Image (cartoon, helix red, strand yellow):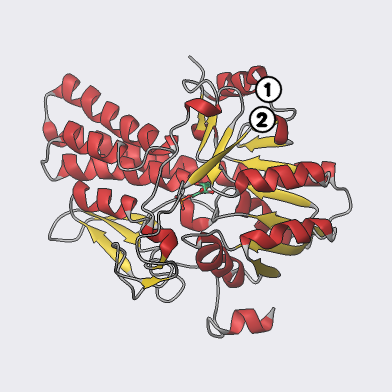
Amino acid sequence: MADQYAQYGEDSKPTETPAIRWEEPPEGPVVVLLDQTRLPAEEVELVCTDASTLVEAIRSLAVRGAPLLGVAGAYGVALAAVRGFDVDEAANALAGARPTAVNLAVGVRRAQAAHRAEYARSGDPEQAATAALTAARALHEEDAEASARMAERGLALLDELLPGGGYRILTHCNTGALVSGGEGTAFAVALAAHRTGQLRRLWVDETRPLLQGARLTAYEAARNGMAYTLLTDNAAGSLFAAGEVDAVLIGADRIAADGSVANKVGSYPLAVLARYHHVPFIVVAPTTTIDLDTPDGASIEVEQRPGHEVTELTAPQVPTMGAEAGGGIPVAPLGTQAYNPAFDITPPELVTAIVTEEGAVSPVTAEALAGLCARSRPV
Ligand code: MRU
């Protein structure tokens, strides 16, 4: 591992720059983001003084990943409230910035509800703003706690399914500290395996087109000193065929009531491969990602991203390039149309288990998920 570590300098260690934080400098409160479009080339922070900057940061993927989107949305509502903007307008803009990850709307609505309730009680905008901020901070902390519990439960499940350790885990997209108040979802399980000496290799899908695997998961794996190897998404098939994958671990952006899982595009083909090769396909997500109001996979809105992310090498693939159409290096003839869904849907029958902070469900059924949510959301 020394060579992978070396590129980050001798004192490499897990990133100390949190993915998101609330700060109160003399000029007024701000939400500070680690700009994920610039990684791994440089750690640059993005300072948001209003909700619209945060909305843009969400759309451009400067801040991303389901749990972190929830935290960002909640802080965005608090920011609007503290700075005296129209809170409901900000909340709607934030909740609608990206459609698939349910955590975004959940985080936004939670801070908005706290603001509304306090304003109704006290009639004091300052106290209402404080209530929104308290709700955002609570969500941030809960997410960190959920992450630690998912890691523990995920590791226990691996031990049960694959006794003896030495895991070769394949993962897709980015699910680590960059998407969470803690160490993430699927990545946190792999990290726990690494720390207990049970991770033989983390196979990292590059995750076309925006390369969250290559840019972000490889970055996190290197900084944590994990044994990892990057592969192109379309190399996964031959890796399974060679018997090199013991388990697939991925996160989720929304889990429907029937157990269908929306996650980064390319997850569904991995589930099909895993089933064919008799390899467990495990989804790790907090209960806030389970959306009982969405009945099934077909009801999940899948974000469609601009075609130029496929037809050009552009930011964030190449951070120095423009992120707008025509700002990058063309890799297809001018005028080529592209199909660019950001997510795909894996049906429940292809999912071996869903691991949450409240426990794991396996097999994945509507009844088991509803039971889990009843435990985590008592009335
Ligand atoms: O488009 P992104 O980068 O926000 O997509 C993120 C993913 O698909 C993650 O796998 C998902 O949010 C789970 S993260 C815990």
Q: Which three-letter amino acid code belongs to the residue tagged 1?
A: Thr
**Can residue 285 be seen by looking at this rendering?**
yes
Q: Position of residue 207 (x, y in %)?
A: 55, 59
Foreground: 324 or 39?
A: 324
Side of 41 where 85 appears, left or right: left
Q: Are marks 2 and 1 in contact (CB under 8 Å)?
A: yes
Task: Please name the residue shown 12% across and 36% down the image.
Answer: 86
Residue behind mark 2? 348
Amino acid type shown at disc 2:
Pro
Q: What residue lies at 55% left-to-right and 67% top-to-bottom?
A: 214
The answer to whether residue 362 is left or right of residue 21 is right
First along the sequence among labels 2 and 1: 2
Q: Is residue 153 visible?
A: no
Residue at the image point whose x is 13% and y is 45% from the top: 83
| 2 or 1: mark nearer the eye | 2
Q: Which residue is mark 1?
A: 365
Quarter occupied by the N terminus = bottom right
Q: Position of residue 39 (x, y in %)?
A: 43, 69
Q: Toward which corner of the image does residue 258 lie, by quadrant? A: top right
| Residue neighbourhood size for the residue with mark 1, other residues' Cα within 10 Å, grouped as few (<14), some (14–19), many (≥20) | some
Which percent across, then down, holds residue 193? Answer: 73, 56
Label 2's element?
Answer: helix
The residue under the point 11% across, 29% down is 124
